[in-house]
């Protein structure tokens, strides 16, 4: 590293930024994880091995990047802040870091098309786009062998939620369709600088080997979106447009052995998969 950054000291980080005429930008959801033990625990959970490829979203000044590189991985980092990108280029010059500048939601597809995805995915994801990043990649059929993400606690609760709970949503089913998901740890605001007004949670996602477990993934995602379209409505009503009519929706639900009066929030992943297969068969008949 061309210069030393004390990633554990908010005062040092503040001074470092001020000396370079830089500042944290709220619009990008920037918060540095200043808890060294937590950083190590997160990368331990990522199971990084020598020579492995890693996508990192939002590296900031490189505290997690440094930890990943120290384990012999090759990192492709997506950074939207031009100032941080300039620091990263200087700090990790000559190391196995490739920087993709710009909004990850607009750049990751091009990176995937040109170079393929990495074995691992890591990110302290901005709270305002975390769900979109995860959902977009899964919906596009992009899955990593393992991913470790730190998100707002409420987002993590949605990722791991069970049926018949308040947090259970189409996003929950989508994540659990693609990955086995487990909680790693909670991180209070004091673990970050600047201190956010919300608590965070780190989640590990391991690619399911039996994916997609349905006849047509596109139909599955359509059924999922339609089912949760209006949370308080029955499946029969929410699926009417997709099926062609309420009567057709009722017929498909009965073929799947699902009561038409049930709501999407009560269905398990397996029930959604079966329902999507019946919907797919109906469309082809």
Image (spheres, rainbow, N blue to C red):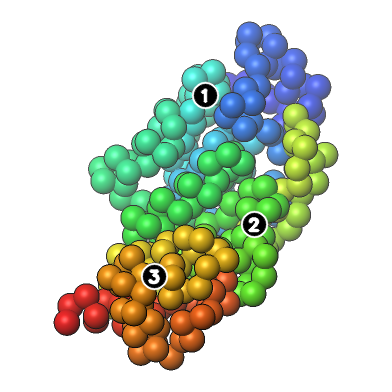
Can residue 96 be seen here? no
Residue 219's place in the image compared with 279, above or below, is above
Q: CA distance from mark 2 to mark 1?
A: 25 Å
Residue 30 position in % (x across, y down): 63, 31
Q: Which residue corresponds to the image point at 41% horizontal and 58% vertical from the top-left?
A: 138
Q: Which callout, 1 or 3, points to the residue nearer the camera? A: 3
Does dot 1 land on a helix, a strand or a loop? loop
Residue at position x 49%, y 64% from top? 228
| Image quadrant containing the C terminus | bottom left
* Number of numbered discs overlaid on the protein picture: 3
* Residue beneath disc 2: 156
Position of residue 113 measured from the top left corner of the image (x, y, whole percent):
26, 46
Residue drawn at (41%, 64%), measured in percent from left and top? Answer: 226
Foreground of the two, 168 or 74: 168
Residue 16: x %, y % from top left: 70, 17
As drawn, 94 above or below 233: above
- Report the residue that reaches farthest toward the left: 285
Indicate whether 96 appears above or below 185.
above
Q: Which residue is mark 3?
A: 239
């Amino acid at each position: 590293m061309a210069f030393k950054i004390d990633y554990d000291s908010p005062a040092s980080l503040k001074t470092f930024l001020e000396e370079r005429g830089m500042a944290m930008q709220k619009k990008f959801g920037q918060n540095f994880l200043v808890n060294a033990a937590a950083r190590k625990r997160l990368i331990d959970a990522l199971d990084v091995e020598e020579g492995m490829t890693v996508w990192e979203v939002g590296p900031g000044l490189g505290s997690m990047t440094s930890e990943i590189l120290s384990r012999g991985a090759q990192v492709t980092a997506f950074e939207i802040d031009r100032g941080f990108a300039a620091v990263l280029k200087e700090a990790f010059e000559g190391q196995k870091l490739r920087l993709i500048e710009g909004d990850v939601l607009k750049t990751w597809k091009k990176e995937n098309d040109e170079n393929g995805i990495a074995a691992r995915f890591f990110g302290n994801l901005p709270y305002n786009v975390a769900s979109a990043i995860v959902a977009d990649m899964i919906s596009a059929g992009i899955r990593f062998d393992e991913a470790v993400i730190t998100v707002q606690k409420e987002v993590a609760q949605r990722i791991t939620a069970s049926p018949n709970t308040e947090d259970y949503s189409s996003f929950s089913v989508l994540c659990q369709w693609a990955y086995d998901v487990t909680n790693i740890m909670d991180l209070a605001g004091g673990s970050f600088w600047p201190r956010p007004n919300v608590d965070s949670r780190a989640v590990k996602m391991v690619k399911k080997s039996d994916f997609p477990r349905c006849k047509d993934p596109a139909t599955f995602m359509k059924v999922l979106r339609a089912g949760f379209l209006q949370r308080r409505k029955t499946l029969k009503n929410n699926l009417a447009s997709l099926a062609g009519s309420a009567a057709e929706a009722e017929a498909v639900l009965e073929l799947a052995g699902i009561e038409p009066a049930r709501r999407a929030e009560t269905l398990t992943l397996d029930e959604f998969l079966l329902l999507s297969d019946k919907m797919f068969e109906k469309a082809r008949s």
